[in-house]
Image (tube, grey):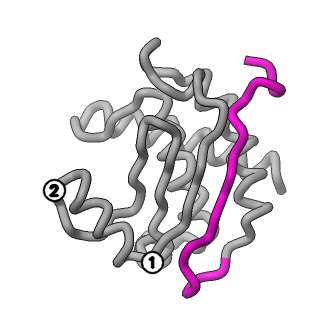
Amino acid sequence: MPPSSLPKLRIYNRQKAHAVSLPWLRRVGKAALPACLDALKSPEAPLPSLPEIEITLVNDEDIARVHGDFLDDPTPTDVITFHHGEILISADTALRQGAENGQSFDHEVALYLVHGLMHLAGWDDHEEEEAREMARRQESILRAALKAVA
């Protein structure tokens, strides 16, 4: 897919507790998009047909509400991806899990963005084998994207 036909990324910060550079995150997402498209898992995956992807950073309370409403699990989670092109990222979870994994907040948020893009490319992380392969690919994509925007 030529760069001009890549989905447009719109990124919003709806939480106030944690600062993140939205222009930097947009650059990371744009750098990761071609590799996520190359990693397309199935022809039915929505990513190639989306004109726009909306990424919104929220807090744990907001993502837990959405998690409960749509997935019957009212607990906070890191990322929720909707196939119509919406990705919700919990900034609170990124801060907490980043610290647990020895990663910066920005790195963890960027990882969640790539994770959401991989879901839009048809990847699922509910089965252990596919989750391992998805994690391997998203780490590689994230490394390349971070290098491209450095």
Camera-side mark, 2 or 1: 2
The alpha-carbon separation of the residues under discs 2 and 1 comes to 20 Å
* Residue numbers of the magenta segment: 1-19
Where, by quadrant of the figure, is residue 76 drawn?
bottom left
The residue positioned 81% from the left and 46% from the top of the image is: 148
Is residue 95 at least partly visible in the picture? yes
Left/right of residue 31 with respect to residue 12 in the rendered view: right
| Whole-percent x, y for residue 147 in the image | 77, 49
**Dot 1: within a 10 Å radius of its alpha carbon, few (fewer than 14), some, or many (20 or more) residues?**
many
Say the numbered circle drawn on residue 92: 1
The residue positioned 16% from the left and 56% from the top of the image is: 72
Say the numbered circle drawn on residue 72: 2
As rendered, which of 47 and 37 lies closer to the eye?
47
Residue furthest bottom as drawn: 17
Q: Amino acid at mark 2?
A: Asp
| Whole-percent x, y for residue 118 in the image | 49, 37
| Whole-percent x, y for residue 90 in the image | 45, 68
Marks 2 and 1: CB-CB under 8 Å? no
Say the numbered circle drawn on residue 59: none
Answer whether residue 40 is magenta in the image. Answer: no
The residue positioned 62% from the left and 47% from the top of the image is: 142
Q: Amino acid at mark 1?
A: Asp
